[in-house]
Each structure stands twice: as C-alpha cells, then as structure tokens.
Image (tube, coloured by chain):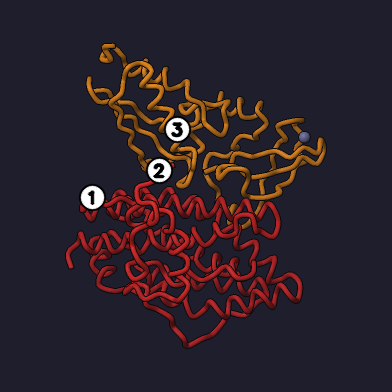
Chain colours: A orange, B red
Amino acid sequence: MNTSTYTKEQLFSLLSEIPDPEIPVINIIELGILRDVQWDGSLCTVIITPTYSGCPAMKVIEDDIRIKLNEIGISNVKIDLVYSPAWTTDWISDIAKEKLRAYGIAPPDHSTIDKAVLMGKARELKCPQCGSKNTEMISQFGSTACKALYRCLDCKEPFDYFKCL
Amino acid sequence: MNLQQAKFEYLLRLGDSSLIIGHRLSEWCGHGPILEEDIALINIALDFVGNATSLLGYAAQVEGKGRTEDDLAYLRGEREYRNLLLTEQPNGDYAATIARQFLYDTYTFFLYEELKSSKDETIAAIAVKSHKEITYHLRHTTQWMLRLGDGTEESHQRLQTALNELWMFTSELFDMDEVDGLLINEGIAADLDKVKAAWEKRVNEVITEATLQVPVTNIKQKGSREGKHSEHLGFLLAEMQYIPRSYPGSKW
Ligand SMILES: [Zn+2]
C-alpha cells in the first residue's frame, strides 16, 4: 500500500481509535497523550507524552500505536516519548470529561494542581453515580496513579476521582 | 572532570536515588497495613521508578556509550550506585517507612522545585513532570507524620525512634562536591544550600506539629558519592537484578 497517501488528519483519526488501556471509554487523543504525528514518506514519528512518569499503560499504548499503523501498511514507526510540556489534566477535553463521568469516574475539576493539596484538604466532589456532593476521600491514591479513591455518603458507592495534575 | 562527565554523574545521583527508594517502596506490595496504603505506596513507587527511567535514560544518552536505562539499572554493582544512603534504608515498621519517605519527599519537593528552572531542558522537563507527582507524595507522608506522631503513645514512640535512627543520613542530602559546583556554574544543577534551608524549615514545622522532637546527632553518614553504601544496598540489588543477570536479554 502506498502509505504516502495518508494526511496528518487521517493518521490522527486512525489513532483516535486507540483507547486508554485503563479507561477504555476515552481515547489517547481525548486524554492528551498523543501530541503529534509526523510522516515524511518513509518514517512515521509519533510523539506521545506520559500522564504519570511511571504510568504502566504507556508501553501498551506504544504497542497499540504500532499495531494500528501496521494495519494500514506503515511499518517504519518511531515513537518519541516527550516530557515537555508536561502533561496536565487541562488537556482532557470537556467531551472526554463527560465520558469519564458517565463511566463512573469523577473528572478532574480544577485546572492545575493546587497548593492546598499540601495542606491535606480534600476538595468537594460530586458523586458520578447520583450527583450528591456528600462525598469523602478514602485515599489519595486509587486503582491507578492518576486516580484517588472517594466514596459517596448518600448512595454509598465508592468511586474513582481523576486527580488534577 | 568535564561538563559531560559531571552531568552523567549528576543524573546517576538523581536517578539512582529514585530507583532505589522506588524499589524499597515496592517491597510493601501486598504487605501494606491497610489496602488503601498498600495501593498508595505502590503508586508512589511507580512514580519513582518512572522518574528513574527518565533520568537514567537521559544519563545513558549523555554518556554516549550505547548503554540504556536498563543497563544502568540492572548491570551496575553496588559500588557504582550513587543513590543517597537514606533511600536504601530498610522499610522497618510503617513508622520507619513514613519517616524515611517524609524526609526524602520534603527534600525532592524543594530539589525538583529548583531543577524546574535548570538550563538543561531535559532535566527541567523531567523536573516539571516529577514535581507535580512529588507534591502528592509529600502530602501523603505529611499526613501520616501528623497521624502517627500525634496518634497513640506507641505510634508516637515508633515514629520518634524512626526519625532518630534515620537522622544521621540526612546531612548527606545536602553535600556538594566538584560535580555540583561545575553544574551550578552552568545553571544546570540545584544549589543544595538553598534546598537545605527550605528543607530544615519545613521538616522542623511538621515534626513539631506532629508533637515530635527534632533529633540531634553528630553522626553524619556519607559515602554514596564514592559508591560506599550501607550493608543494605547489596541485598536490594541482588533481588532487583537477579532476573536480568541470570537471563541476560530476556523479554516479557
Ligand atoms: Zn452517590
């Protein structure tokens, strides 16, 4: 297949089919992990950035990108992991935030990490199940590095909160 | 010593400390006092190991001898490791782990704050990323310092004992040598005198709020810069390096 016929938009659209391995309702573009795709006719360079330094999902995402590009005949793929600018929850789109909520994960509700975090004050969060604000933090660290664990005191359901970073 | 050598050495110091303390924390996996803490410590361990991967990957690149971050992590012996002695100290009871993490998290919180403005773009980028994560680590350990220190008689006593025993490893955090001097001149490394002032202030505040005593000691354990470690590092490396050394080049 003549791969040079693919535009950047087409490649982005193709890669948007790759879900986050741990939160499969949002894709790697909505999450802000995929930063750029460069195609010079023979080599495809994909630029990604990790959410957390030690995020174990990054390796899976790299493999998924290679597989996806391979499917359309692009086999010469280089994946660059960049740290700057550092990933922030600000890059999660509003649509993706709504998807997170519907999936049962409270989305990040602040633009950047706040200094109050040091003082140990937990913020008021809406339960993604029933919408109640009567919730409390169980642990700052949840099922994955990017999440904290909360519980709803009204519907009694525990839920994950996507921490601001 | 030239700039490249100094940078390689500096990156090893940063990266090795992250790797070793991350590995230490990973030993809690499945042994945490409560499920939430087990999960928290393992998440934090992952952050450290991820940070080490970035730093050692960059160290290997700076060295330019074709080594990778895995070669540096798995194929160097104890005397080639440059991690701070504090980071290799055993987990002990939960108070000992919390005390070690608190002293180290407070250190990295101020150290990486400085490194965010490093003139080396890669170091600065790693620092920006890591500092956000460190903020969460420090919050976690600070809360436990207060909870255990101002908790029961036993938790208070255990935490005080842990602080007393670890205190002799804290002066090394701020030692500077030729490597630091060279890189500070270039605007690449952090001035540890500055970090020390901020560290002492914050550590004293938290220890006091936790109703504990700031330890006093004349003993200053050091040696990590020359690869002279406490007896604990060798055992840690033996476990961490066993698979890659026994089965070179093996893949998942
Ligand atoms: Zn609810």
For discs 2 and 1, the disc positioned in front in the rendered view: 2
Q: Which residue is mark 1?
A: B66
Work out whether mark 2 precedes mark 1 in sequence or the reverse, and give the earlier one. Answer: 1
Between residues B8 and B244, which one lies in front from this camera angle?
B244
Marked residue chain, label 3? A
Q: Position of residue B107 (x, y in %)?
A: 47, 66
* Disc 3 versus disc 2: nearer the observer: 2
Residue at image position (39%, 69%) is: B194
- Cα distance in 3D space between marks 3 and 2: 18 Å
Tell which of B201 and A88 is nearer to you.
A88
Q: Nearer the viewer, residue B13 or B143?
A: B13
Quadrant containing ligand 1: top right
| Residue position marked by numbered label 3 in the rendering | A61
Q: At label 2, which amino acid type do we have?
A: Lys
Position of the C terminus of chain B, as image quadrant, is: top left
Q: In the rendering, which numbered label is found on residue B251? A: 2
Give me the chain letter of mark 1: B
Of helix, strand and loop, which one carries label 2? loop
Q: Is mark 2 within 8 Å of ligand 1?
A: no
Circle 1: residue type: Gly
Q: Position of residue A119 (x, y in %)?
A: 62, 57
Mark 3 → mark 1, Cα distance in angstroms? 26 Å
Q: Quadrant of residue A95?
A: top right
